[in-house]
Image (cartoon, rainbow, N blue to C red):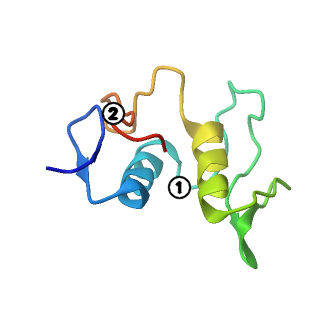
Amino acid sequence: MSACRCACGYEADGSDDLTDHLGEQFIPADDTAPADTARGGTVHAEAADDNRACVCGFTAGSTPGLDAHLLEMFTPADRIGADGRQHSALDEAV
């Protein structure tokens, strides 16, 4: 049994896999934050030359820090993903 699970039932191979799963559910193809958020219309994506920086100008101290920023920008309050199901980490902070 996995140590990293999502509320939807997905069992990840580790925290990186769970982060990827959540990103697939919440981050739109155009990397643009939803209009109904404080940073609506802003593009958020990994900068081409730095895996710790976002194209919005945010700089993290680590790749996991950037991942956390991206999920924060795109995860809706109700945590309902692209598939219409709720997604959140159950066992491990992402």
User: Which of these two is toward me, 92 or 60?
Assistant: 92
N-term-proximal mark, 2 vs 1: 1
Q: Residue at x 31, y 37 (%)?
A: 83
Residue 9, picture quadrant = top left
Residue 86, position as x, y percentages in the image: 34, 28
Residue 58, position as x, y percentages in the image: 82, 53
Residue 63, picture quadrant = bottom right
Relative side of 78 to 52, left or right: left
Asked if 40 appears above or below 31 in the picture, the reply is above
Relative side of 78 to 56, left or right: left
Asked if 35 appears above or below 28 in the picture, the reply is above
Q: Which mark is residue 55?
A: none
Task: In the displayed orientation, state which residue is furthest to the left.
Answer: 1
Q: Give the residue number, with chain letter if any, for mark 2.
A: 90
Asked if 54 appears above or below 7 in the picture, the reply is below
Relative side of 25 to 54, left or right: left
Q: Which mark is residue 29?
A: 1
Q: Residue at x 43, y 60 (%)?
A: 16
**Residue type at numbered disc 1:** Ala
Residue 15, position as x, y percentages in the image: 40, 54
Q: Residue at x 21, y 51 (%)?
A: 2
User: Which of these two is toward me, 31 or 14?
Assistant: 14
Label 2: few (<14), some (14–19) or many (≥20) C-alpha neighbours in 10 Å: some
* Front of the two marks 2 and 1: 2
Asked if 88 appears above or below 2 in the picture, the reply is above
Q: Residue at x 69, y 30 (%)?
A: 35
Q: Secondary structure at mark 2?
A: loop
